[in-house]
Amino acid sequence: MSQICSISKTCACRNVARCQTKEAGRLFLWFPVPHTLKKVTSYLNKFALKYELMHERPGLSLDCRPGQSQEIARNLAQLLAPRELKETQVLFIRGAIQPQIHDFSDITSLQRFIKFNQSDWLVEMLVTERFTSYFQAIVSIQDTSQIYGYESLLRGLDEQGNLVLPGSIMELATEAGLIPQLDQIARLSTIAQISRHQVSGHIFINFAPTSLYDPVFCLRSTVEAIDQAGISHDRIVFEVVESDNPQDLAHLKAVLQYYRDAGFLIALDDLGSGYSSLNLLHQLRPDFIKLDMELIRDVHQNLYKASITEKLLEITQKLNIQTVAEGIECIEELNWLRERGATLAQGYLIAKPSAVPVTTTPHFEAIASNVALADCKLVEQHVQHQNESERIVAAVTQRIRQSLELDEILKTTVAEVRQLFEVDRVIIYQFKPDWSGLVAVESLAEECMSILGFNVMDTCFQSTRAAYFQQGNTRAIKDVENAGLSPCHLDLLRSLQIRANLVVPILQKERLWGLLIAHQCRHPRQWQQSEINLFNQLAGQTAIAIQQSELYHQLQQANQELQRLACSDGLTQVGNRRCFDDTFNAQWQRLAREQGSLSLILCDVDYFKLYNDTHGHLAGDDALRQVAKAISQTVKCPADLVARYGGEEFAVILPNTDMEGAIAVARNIQTNVSVLKMPHPHSHVSEFITLSLGVATITPHRQLSPATLVAAADQGLYQAKAQGRNCVVQMDCEDVEH
């Protein structure tokens, strides 16, 4: 009988298995490449551990005494590269039997195997369902005494009933593959508490949609619980909490569609912090978005945050999406958001999370003000009362934030900090997702060794020191020789010429982005508390600058995508009529100044109504897409534009192209469409789809109207149809009646 440690199954939300790897059994390992097998066998031989090789693919198996499989896995984590950890596959069979077919569903990665074996406390919490839900009020931003609803927030309970905050729970659950189980318990706990407290208004429930294997099966218990509690579906808002980088967008859409079909509402959580959540707006079309609290913090005083938030609110208002501003902690933030059209508000200023949902919230009067003037005065007053340390932070911060480019921000930070603290070396160490990392930037004194790009493969950092720095703690060492460090740690510092160091975390919310580190290379240094405090403040400002850089680039991408969508024809993906009009007028004005020629081709699919009547509108849509693609492939110059002019009619704008060149393009369009050989049995001119084309050329000048060229091309198209279709007719603009 195999062990029942179901680590890797995605649709395991109904079952929380206990891991049996502490017992004796057999460990099977399959490696991505022979090189990995060679490293592992070398390790096993060194410790005289017997194993059997597999011949079908690089792999081996070995018998393990109780707990030995965990020990071997942890040691291999020190030996293998991060990618090897992810791609090495593991199966543990309790006892001394060979694996059966059904055991192979329990195969998982070595990385997840290790994490799962470190998650006993979380598995126990899941098995005994020691969880509860807290609720934080969401109110109308215009009248904060009007409660719109509540966000449900998961809390764990230890064996003594004390609260366990979600940060450590979510982090371990993600790495150990326990998100499906945790997600289901969180949903059901919320529904039970809603029913118990008779909560009114909307309920915002966080959920991880891509942890669901089959939405119909996995969400059935959730929907049943909601129905049994008598809760109307339109009161439930499911928040997508993993929009940072959805691996399967089609699956995510299917999950959300299931919710929508059941009458629930959808929200995107933490907009402004996720990698691609802005780009998901037009694809998921949520009912709500929640603006990230780090974006809201001090938005009334911070030019970068203000610019980004204003643009986000402008976008959501145009798309008719309600906004929830999270983390509001002062009246100035609230009033700033009010004046710019945010819909709903949430934060400690209004109400803290509580086990029993609050029924009343304070009313804050709106304060009319000239926001820009008020902000300037507030900053002025603040600067006047700053102490010396605060003035230094403000000055350095200003220089750090002169750019929104990440590399420039980091380089400015280390240069400013090294000059300020007069140390030998300042570096920023950036973490990768697997907790390895590298020295991203550095600033050096003369005769000091460079360690730029130095890479550290410490995959155990998370379990040994990550929590310490994630809590905002600092590490200051006066003299590494007398700090009681382990021999290997001391040897590493010596090799990098480090005699004293000061390490502070660069934190983004609960995420440890990296470390800001100062090195004294030649002699010890006693770090003063004032220096440590100042170092911490600068690390905090660097973290803000990094996040603003990321947000700025996300916003640029989102604006480009929205602009593309606004100018694109939804069916054929070529330019739409608006794009045609804007481009045509712009080219007319430019060529009027330069006295260059401008050509226009109007194309019409022959007897398209008969095609639709014969094959149906879906086939007609597909035919238009293929025709549009064929036309686009004909047009070569970057300045040329293909647009859908209306119905089955297309337009091609050809700047700096004379009549001869335009006729050649039109002929090539005809050829490319004929090559498609799309059957059209009811056409009167061919057995395949064909085009009629009108071509006109003009040299624009200010005394002429752009409509002259359009009318000429249109008249050419009319004559092409009159001459029997499937032909090209050129028209002289002087012959057109105006």
Image (spheres, rainbow, N blue to C red):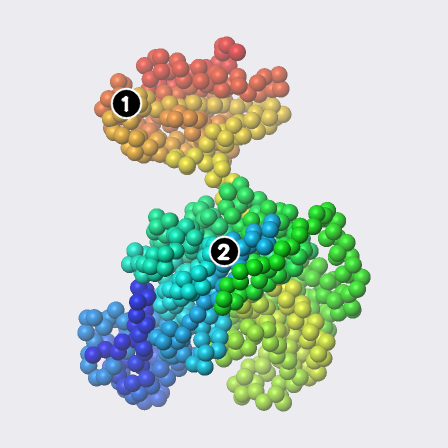
What amino acid type is highlighted by mark number 1? Leu
Instruction: Give how far apart the Cα atoms at labels 1 and 2 are.
Output: 54 Å
Q: Quadrant of residue 633?
A: top left
Residue under pointer 1: 610
**97 vs 312, nearest the viewer:** 312
**The N terminus, quarter of image:** bottom left
Left or right, residue 410 beside residue 526: left
**369 vs 191, nearest the viewer:** 191
Q: Considering only order in the chain, which callout, 2 or 1, is on the residue closer to the N terminus?
A: 2
Residue 108 seen by the camera:
no
Q: How far across and down, in percent of the image, does residue 684 sit? A: 26, 18
Residue under pointer 2: 149
Q: Quadrant of residue 110?
A: bottom left
Figure check: 369 above or below 496: above
Q: Residue at x 27, y 18 (%)?
A: 685
Q: Residue at x 66, y 71 (%)?
A: 536
Figure check: 362 above or below 693: below
Q: How far across and down, in percent of the image, does residue 355 sit? A: 49, 68
Residue 22 seen by the camera:
yes
User: Neighbour class for label 1 at 10 Å: few (<14), some, many (≥20)?
Assistant: some
Marking on residue 429: none
Left or right, residue 323 beside residue 60: right
Q: How far across and down, in percent of the image, does residue 477 sit? A: 64, 82
Task: Give SS at disc 1.
Answer: helix
Q: How far across and down, in percent of the image, does residue 621 sit? A: 33, 32
> Which one is in front in this view, the residue at disc 1 or the one at disc 2?
2
What amino acid type is highlighted by mark number 2? Gly
